[in-house]
Image (cartoon, helix red, strand yellow):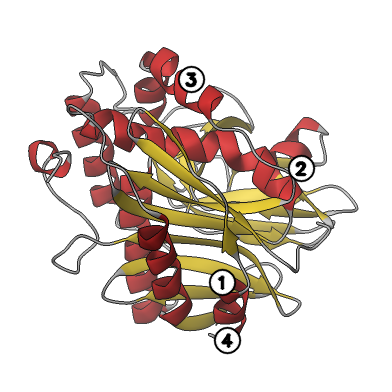
Amino acid sequence: MQAISDTINQLHLGKSTTFEGLTVFPLFGDTAFEADYLTLDEALEQEQARVIEVDEDGDVPNLLFENLGDSKVLLLDGDELIGAKQNRVINLTILVPAHTKIEIPVSCVEAGSWSYRSSEFSSAKRAMFSRARASKAEQVTVRMKRSGERYSDQSEVWEDVAECASYLNVDSPTSSMADMYEQHEKQLGTYREAFKAEDNQVGAVFAVNGHVQGVEYFDSPRPFKLQLDKLVGSYAVEAVLRKKGISKETTEAVAGGFLAQVAAAKGEAYTGLGEGEDVRLSADELSGGALVAEERVVHLAAFNRDPEGRVVRRRPSRWYSDE
């Protein structure tokens, strides 16, 4: 898609920072936009939005989002919402107009819960770990191509959470992704402290032990800065699980090569649930999605595939090697 290609091609990489196996290359652009929307976290904190179950009985793959304010609200792929009957993550990025109520597609990340703990959801202030997010992105793309529905494969999402939790020796009565993060918060917190947003930074390329894992781009520095801690935590899980011996360095050429693959990827556009278009990215080397509105890329997330050309779906003992 031309908007994505043009956007990626005007980005340039900054100097990378590496900490305990995780390398982050900052991205800067020439056409940064002054964001006219709130992020979900901002809207919830300002009581400008609320998220609830679709009805009293609830529906696992759907939640009801209500924008109560005068500003648009950006809901971001992979962000976790906690509360109500069970914790969920958002399936793709949605830009919700002011004073609008819509159903949003989500995936459950707490298999063992289905009873009310609160009437409304709150933000967990974290994003789904990157390996599972990559897998979910591919699942959503496949479902959209087949039926136009924006759903994941829920059984695979649960499997991803269970496998990662098992490898991290996490004890969780409800098989909750939240327990995985909370029980490793001290270690993940050291990663978040190591990476800070730079002036005018609009995105980043993330790599673990010499291998690019993914890229995140926003149309404005403000939402990227607000989201950076979540993104670092998401990729830090991968770094923790791959941590063996001396970390391999990721070169600027490798990071730039991945950006070129994103720019060249095929994009298939669908009418957005809110404003703009949902663009699903697919190529032999990557998967992901973007939200394009008002002739600009508002948000893009793309993930690297494994050498066999599939989004990585392996048992933990094979997932997290240094090979």
Instruction: Name which residue type carries label 2.
Output: Ala
Q: Is residue 122 left or right of residue 311?
A: right
Quadrant location of residue 300? bottom right
* Tag 2 and tag 4, C-beta contact below 8 Å: no
Residue 144 tag number: none
Residue behind mark 3: 189
Question: How far apart, in angstroms, are the residues tagged by discs 2 and 4?
Answer: 33 Å
Instruction: Name which residue type carries label 4.
Output: Gln
Residue behind mark 2: 49
* Most distant residue in the right direction: 70
- What crowding class fits label 1: few (fewer than 14 Cα within 10 Å), some (14-19), or many (20 or more)? many
Instruction: Name which residue type carries label 3.
Output: Gly
Q: Closer to the N terminus: mark 4 or mark 3?
A: 4
Position above or below: 257 against 13: below
Locate residue 231, reporting x and y percent: 51, 41
Instruction: Name which residue type carries label 1.
Output: Ile
Does the image show residue 22? yes
Residue 8 tag number: 1
| Secondary structure of residue under mark 3 | helix
Question: How far apart, in angstroms, are the residues tagged by discs 4 and 3?
Answer: 38 Å
79 and 259: which is toward the camera = 259
